[in-house]
Each structure stands twice: as structure tokens, then as C-alpha cells.
């Protein structure tokens, strides 16, 4: 069940699905924030520093988006449409009797604590709940990531438990809290 729109707007942000032609913007976003992102996710800094890598990833994501398997939006301030503020993705989208997905997100260091992530994710949830008819969204977050926990809880996510050794980050297996939000409009 692929969705049709590749751009959306909120009060302050433009959200869009980027293609391989946006790889330079994505590369710049990662270069500026790489050190911080490595604290929270599985990332290979050597690979992520190449334009070709981002072209390939954006190509693959565009293909998966067209098939309704995932969707990644990059978000920009309306006043600065060529500078990525952050990104979120709904991935592992399942339909039929599952109707669920997982969400991941990141915001550039200079754009945090301004409400951008909440504004963008709120719109993202609206899209997956209303346009894709998803029933359940899951998120995993490191227990020491207070900002991310606060964001999820402010968006109505409920902590369901602790997933032991969920992801390997910087060579170490790390536990993650598991959160979920149910589409109450169904």
C-alpha cells in the first residue's frame, strides 16, 4: 500500500522524501553530525562520508518507498530549504493483519531543543496512521537518551519493556527500551 505524497508541510517545516539527487545535502547533514549520531546508532563513519554511499542509500530508500515498505522524510526549515534539520523513517512496514512499523529519527545537533523533531514526527505519525492505515508503531531507544525518551512520551508512546542487547553500537551490544504507540483512531 504505497503512499502518494513525497512532500508535506507543518507550521515551520518542509518534509520531503529525498532522492539520489539530494545526496550532497544528506552527506553534509551526516558529516556535520557524525560524532553525535555514533553515540546512538549503528553507523560506519568511513562509509557514511562518501557521496556514492548516500546516492545508493537514497536510491534504495526511494525504491522501498514506492513499494510501501518504508518511508524516510528529511525535514527542513521552510526558511532554509537546502539545509537538513533532521530525518525520520518508518521502516519494516507490514500490512494485512500486522499493520505495524518501526520508527527511527535523528536531528542535527544545532537544531535540538527547538521542537522540530516533535513537529516532524507528529506529522509523520499522522501520515502512517491516516494514509497507510498502520495500527502500531514501535520505537527503540537507549535508556540514557533522556531527550529521545521525552520526545516519544510526549507523542503518546508507551514504554513496553527493555529489549536486551538489541543493537550493537560502537562494538558493544546495548539494551534499548521498547516503546509503542497504537493508532487510537481505528
Image (spheres, rainbow, N blue to C red):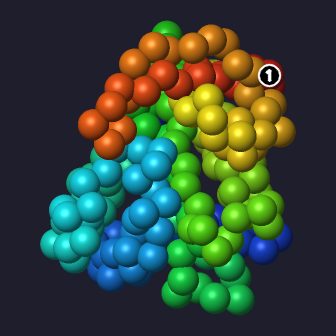
Instruction: Tell me which residue sits at (55%, 49%) in the image.
Output: 105
| Residue 133 location, quadrant | top right
Locate the N terminus by quadrant.
Answer: top left
Q: Is residue 120 visible?
A: yes
Instruction: Tell me which residue sits at (75%, 53%) in the image.
Output: 118
Asked whether, in this view, residue 22 is left or right of residue 56, the answer is: right
Q: Which residue is mark 1?
A: 184
| Residue 155 location, quadrant | top right
Q: Nearer the viewer, residue 96 or 160?
A: 160
Q: Is residue 86 above or below residue 63?
A: below
Asked whether, in this view, residue 130 is left or right of residue 108, the answer is: right
What x and y, as percent, mark residue 147?
Answer: 72, 46
What x and y, as percent, mark residue 132?
Answer: 56, 36
What x and y, as percent, mark residue 73?
Answer: 51, 59
Asked whether, in this view, residue 19 is left or right of residue 44, the answer is: right
Locate the C terminus by quadrant.
Answer: top right
Q: Is residue 4 visible?
A: no
Amino acid at each position: 500500500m504505497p503512499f502518494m505524497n513525497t512532500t508535506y508541510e507543518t507550521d515551520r517545516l518542509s518534509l520531503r522524501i529525498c532522492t539520489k539527487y539530494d545526496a550532497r545535502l544528506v552527506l553534509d547533514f551526516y558529516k556535520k553530525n557524525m560524532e553525535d549520531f555514533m553515540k546512538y546508532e549503528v553507523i560506519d563513519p568511513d562509509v557514511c562520508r562518501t557521496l556514492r554511499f548516500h546516492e545508493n542509500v537514497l536510491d534504495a530508500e526511494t525504491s522501498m518507498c514506492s513499494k510501501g515498505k518504508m518511508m524516510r522524510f528529511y525535514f527542513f526549515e521552510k526558511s532554509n530549504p537546502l539545509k537538513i534539520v533532521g530525518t525520520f523513517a518508518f521502516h519494516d512496514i507490514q500490512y494485512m493483519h500486522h499493520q505495524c512499523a518501526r520508527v527511527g529519527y535523528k536531528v542535527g545537533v544545532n537544531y535540538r531543543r527547538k521542537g522540530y523533531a516533535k513537529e516532524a514526527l507528529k506529522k509523520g505519525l499522522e501520515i502512517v496512521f491516516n494514509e497507510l492505515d498502520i495500527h502500531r508503531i514501535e520505537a527503540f531507544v537507549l535508556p540514557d537518551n533522556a531527550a529521545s525518551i521525552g520526545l516519544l512520551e510526549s507523542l503518546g508512546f508507551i514504554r513496553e519493556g527493555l529489549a536486551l542487547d538489541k543493537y550493537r553500537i560502537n562494538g558493544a551490544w546495548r539494551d534499548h527500551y521498547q516503546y509503542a504507540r497504537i493508532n487510537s483512531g481505528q
